Amino acid sequence: MLAAPTVGSALRLSAAVIAAVNAAGFTLTALSRSHKLTDLTGTSAFIASAWATHAAAASSSLSSSSSLASTLFKPTRGFALACVVSAWGARLSAHLFTRVLKLGKDERLDFLFPAENEPGLLVGGSSMFPLKLAGFWTAQGAWAWVCLLPVTVLHGNPTAARGKLGFLGAACVAAALGFVAVEAVADSQKNRHYKDPSKKGKPCTEGLYSVVRFPNYAAEIGVWTSIAAAAASAPGVLASAPLAVVASPLFTYALLAHGSGIPPLEEAHEKKYGSDAEYRRWKREVPRLFPDVFKVLK
């Protein structure tokens, strides 16, 4: 039987795995000067960390009569949350990777790369390649580590991680998977909108976008809030690291509502659709992030 992990050792393991995956992604991106691996690698780090910390918690209960596979895939709390993170990561990475393959690049990341006629590394100029790129990948790793804190803390409490979900935990896991599905629907609706020639130059205001203006971001907050609640439902987890457990949904909300999520999109929308009467009505009447429950049920 291996030594049982602690919250501290689980946090260090998560940081090491995330750093390794993102370092590999940075190296390949810097050498290829391509945007295509960014989101694919970034989301893969979430999955790798969740399973690494789950494996550490599960392995501590190994006995001579049990195999690692049977222990790793036993339907426990830790296994369930690793699966939720995998479902979220697989869905998001598939969506973003397909999009960047179709577009050829992610224009939002152009500032991290030098112009085509600038050779070599450390060329200076506005891109400061690859220094800004390294900073971006470091921030991407920090994002993964913070978002995964509830899962990591759960796995740092191996007795809780190896326990059954229970009713509350199962409800939170179901909610998280439901929010992943909402994200998929929102992205699908927007894709269909932009493919429709009759809606060219018009904002997407139908479907989930008629309920809130940024349903994918609302669902993203819901995913990490549900994951945090599922982890917190396990005995002793919240008490062992309360700030770490609640940091994930708070950080996700701050990042999306006030950081790199909604603000730049709203600015882009204003430039693109600001003179459109339908856009102004939609922006005035439809909530930004959280739906008006009474209006929806009316």
Image (spheres, rainbow, N blue to C red):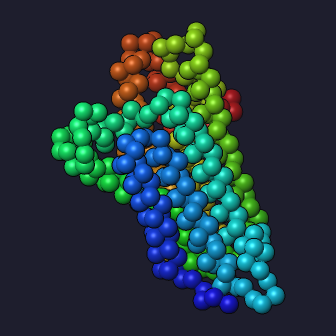
Residue 210 is at least partly visible in this image? no
Does 51 sit left or right of 259 as displayed?
A: right
Residue occupying image coordinates x 62% and y 57%:
85
Q: Residue furthest right?
A: 65
Residue 221: image x %, image y %?
A: 54, 49
Quick one: quadrant of the C terminus? Answer: top right
Residue 19: image x %, image y %?
A: 43, 64
Q: Which residue lies furthest to the left in this view?
A: 124
Comparing 136 with 27, the one in front is 27
> In the picture, residue 236 is in which quadrant?
bottom right
Quick one: quadrant of the N terminus? Answer: bottom right
Q: Which residue lies furthest to the top in this view?
A: 198
* 90 vs 73: above or below: above
Comparing 46 with 210, the one in front is 46
Residue occupying image coordinates x 55% and y 40%:
97
> In the picture, residue 115 is in which quadrant?
top left
Residue occupying image coordinates x 40% and y 48%:
29
* 54 vs 93: above or below: below
Residue occupying image coordinates x 34% and y 36%:
110
Residue 197: image x %, image y %?
A: 57, 11
* 133 vs 18: above or below: above
Residue 38: image x %, image y %?
A: 45, 46
Residue 50 is at least partly visible in this image? yes
Number of marks in the rendered image: 0
